[in-house]
Structures are given as C-alpha cells and as structure tokens.
Image (cartoon, rainbow, N blue to C red):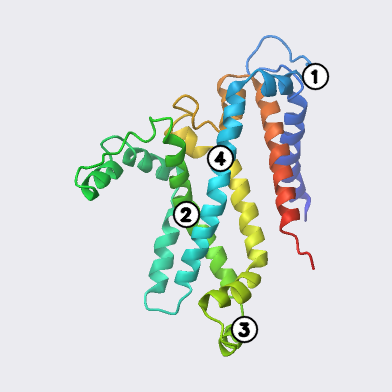
Amino acid sequence: MATPAVVLLVLFLIVPVVLAFVLSFTNARLVSPNPPRFVGLDNFIRAFTQDPVFTRSALNTAIFAAVVVPVQAGFALFLAILVNQKIRGVVAFRVIFFIPVVTSIVVVSILWKFMYQDDGLINNAIDTLTFGAWSGTAWLQNPSTALGAIIVLSIWQAVGFHMLIWLSGLQTIPEELYEAARMDGAGTWQQFVNVTWPGLRSTMVFILVTITIAALGLFVQIDVMTQGGPVNSTTSLVYHAVRKGYREQETGYGAALSLIFFVAVLLIALLQRYLTRDKD
C-alpha cells in the first residue's frame, strides 16, 4: 500500500537532493558539450569569497526574515485575538483577512507591483492623505525602499493564514481558566500573560518555524516584481541560486548555493527549536 508513496518520495525528494549534493562539487552546466568535472570545494569557496551578489542575497534574506517573522507572527496574533471575540459579523472579518492567502502569490505580486509604481495607488493615497505635502517614490525602483516594499506585501499576503492558526490555538484554551483568573482579580493584560500566552506555546513554536522557513525561501515576489533589482537590493538566496543554476546555466554552482541554503535553514530551524523547547 505504501509503495506508490515511497516511489514518489524517492523520485521527487531523495533523488533531487542527492543530485544537488553531487552536482555542487562539479562544474556542470545546463547545456555544455563538455562533461561535468569534479572541482571539489571550488563552488563553495567562490560563493563566500568571489561572489558579492551571494553575500548581498544572504544579507537581504536575513533582513527579510528578521522583520517578517516577528511582525507577521505578532500581527497575526493581534488579529486572531480580535476575531476570537464573540461579536456580530466576526466570521466576515475572518474571511476578509483570509482572502489574500487563497489568492495566488503571483497575482498578488503583480497587483502590488502596479500599486507601487510612481503613479500607483499607494502614492496617490499618500498624496491625498498629506494634501500634497509629501509624495511617495517609485518604491520598487528605489534601492532603499524596494526590499521594504516587498516585506510589507509579504506580511499582508500571509498574515491571514497564521491568524487562523493562532485562532485555533486560542479556541483550545478552556474558558474556565479565564474565569478563574478574573475571580482572582486579573486584568486583561494579566490574563493574556498568565493564561493565553502559556496556552499558545505549542502554536507559537509551529508558527515561528513555518514563518521562518517560508521567509528564508523568498522567491516568487522577487521574481515577479524586481528580478533581484535594483542593484541587487532585493536579491534573495533562493532567487540567486535559481538565477545561477537555471537562467545562467551554471548548474554546479547553483546546486552549491542550494546546498548552502539548505544547511543554513536546517541550522536556523534546529536553533529555533532548541530555544523554544519545553524546559519542563
């Protein structure tokens, strides 16, 4: 019964990983009359010493993850607490916040690309709200604002998904605990610190790990909106690996970048899991 699943797992997971590992130690090209040659650690040395775009892409990815992970998790928790109230029309708010999640990230990126233009919706809104005192910029063409613009889009697009996960965690906390806290005179903030937050521990760990992995894998928004520009200010590790391995046909070097990315994500996930472990 498990044979088809095992075959698919081996075919689409194990084999690609092994191939990437092997290719990362060669000078293989996507289209070349010469057979691949073993080059040892040359691809890895090149990445760390001779490829400034790799350094910039690693920095961009780190900045993106450092901002997106806490902001998106915190904002999603805030929304989850709001839509967990027993008020009229709360289901409509849940649907509204979740709509961006079920919209293709490609479509979302194209729409926001238009909105970020010099004469786009965002600049027109800024101009209207400030009565012309401050005008925006071409957000994606400016190296100082391009990555920030993509961060805002990414947080907005996925916050609804994590809101639902937080909401499912909130609804597993027994109401009796809140009643006991109120009987002890606990205020809203004390209830959150002593009842809500401890009850959300496992949910918090899951959300932090999933957001971190998704943030480190930033690709589609970059590919659709900026292609890494301007001046590599939005290039991410995954985008750089794809560009080198596929578009510039340096398969061996692209595989090496992918392997570096894999090890980095694994180490970060293990560190995150260690820091959020249950010490009891």
Among numbered discs 4 and 1, the one appearing first in the sequence: 1
Image coordinates for residue 166, horizontal then vertical, percent? 56, 65
Element at badge 4?
helix
Task: Report the amino acid beneath label 1.
Answer: Gly
Badge 2 amino acid: Val
For this rendering, which residue is in front, 199 or 37? Answer: 199
Give the mark toward the camera: 2 or 1. Answer: 1
- Residue at numbered disc 4: 63
Left or right position of 33 against 77: right
Q: Please state, as top left, top right, bottom left or bottom right, where the C terminus lies in the image.
A: bottom right
Q: Residue furthest bottom?
A: 183
Do we see residue 52 in this rendering?
yes
Q: Residue at x 63, y 64 (%)?
A: 203
- In the picture shown, does residue 32 fall above or below 264? above
Q: Which sits in the foreground, 62 or 248? A: 62
The amino acid beneath tag 3 is Leu
**Quadrant of the frame with the N terminus:** bottom right
Q: Which residue is mark 3?
A: 177
Count how many numbered circles sit on residues in the image: 4
Q: Work out which residue is located at the far left of the displayed protein and give it.
A: 131
Distance (Cα) linking label 2 and label 4 = 23 Å
Label 2, label 1: how far apart the Cα atoms are: 43 Å
Residue 266 shown left or right of residue 179 in the figure: right
Please tell me whether mark 1 sits on a helix, a strand or a loop. loop
| Number of residues whose C-alpha sits closer than 10 Å to that of mark 2, classed few (under 14), some (14–19) or many (20 or more) | some
Mark 1 and mark 3: Cα distance apart in space: 60 Å
Residue at mark 1? 40
- In front of the other: label 1 or label 3? 3
Question: For the residue carrying disc 1, how many other residues have a C-alpha within 10 Å: few (<14), some (14-19), or many (20+)?
Answer: few
